[in-house]
Image (cartoon, rainbow, N blue to C red):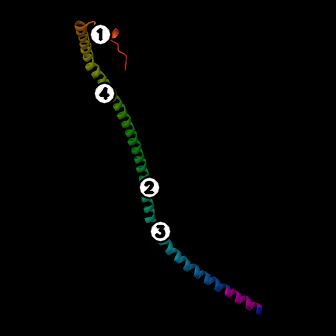
Amino acid sequence: MVAVVVIALAVVAQAGVLLAMYLLARRVTGKLELLMDESRKLIAPLESITNSLKAVADDLGRTAQIAREQVLRVQSIVNETRENIRTQLHDVRERVLDTVDEARETVMRPVRHYSAIALAFAEGVRTFFGGDRRQQGKSGDERPAA
């Protein structure tokens, strides 16, 4: 009989524990449902924020790619311009030097002609007025250096 009472008390205690577990599970379930409702409310804005961030990241990626292409294009334009300027400076330098050479030749040709004429005239006058002095000075008037 004692065993029956102990078994009955154990069954009642088990029923009490099961009832407490059931009540606790219902309370936890209610709280979980509230948490789920709150998280469902937050999911829509989070998805919107995520989509916005993804769009911004895509736009930034495209912008960075465009900026890189523009920088490369500007760099190639600068390099091309530098080479063109070097080439043009070289061409201008060559033209200036050629022009200076032509001007020198143009100016110096008549000067050489007139100089040759003047030299010939001076030699003619010298020969005409004092012809043999030059030859005499070379042979007979040599004086020793002191």
Q: Mark 3 falls on what kind of element?
A: helix
Q: Amino acid at mark 1?
A: Arg
Mark linked to residue 57: 2
Using the image as rendered, state which of residue 20 and residue 144 is in the foreground: 144
- Residue in view at x 64 percent, y 82 percent: 18
Label 3 sits on residue: 40
The image shows residue 44, relative to residue 146, as above or below, that is below
Report the Cα–Cα distance between label 4 and label 2: 57 Å
Label 1 sits on residue: 134
Which range is magenta? 3-13
Q: Do the numbered discs 1 and 4 sit on residues whose CB atoms are within 8 Å? A: no
Is residue 4 within the magenta segment? yes
Q: Do the numbered discs 3 and 4 sit on residues whose CB atoms are within 8 Å? A: no
Q: Mark 2 falls on what kind of element?
A: helix
Q: N-terminal of the two: label 3 or label 2?
A: 3
Q: N-terminal of the two: label 1 or label 4?
A: 4
Q: Do the numbered discs 4 and 2 sit on residues whose CB atoms are within 8 Å? A: no
Report the Cα–Cα distance between label 2 and label 1: 102 Å
Q: Amino acid at mark 3?
A: Arg
Q: Position of residue 132 (x, y in %)?
A: 28, 6
Report the Cα–Cα distance between label 1 and label 4: 47 Å
Label 4 sits on residue: 96
Q: Position of residue 111 (x, y in %)?
A: 25, 17
Q: Mark 4 falls on what kind of element?
A: helix
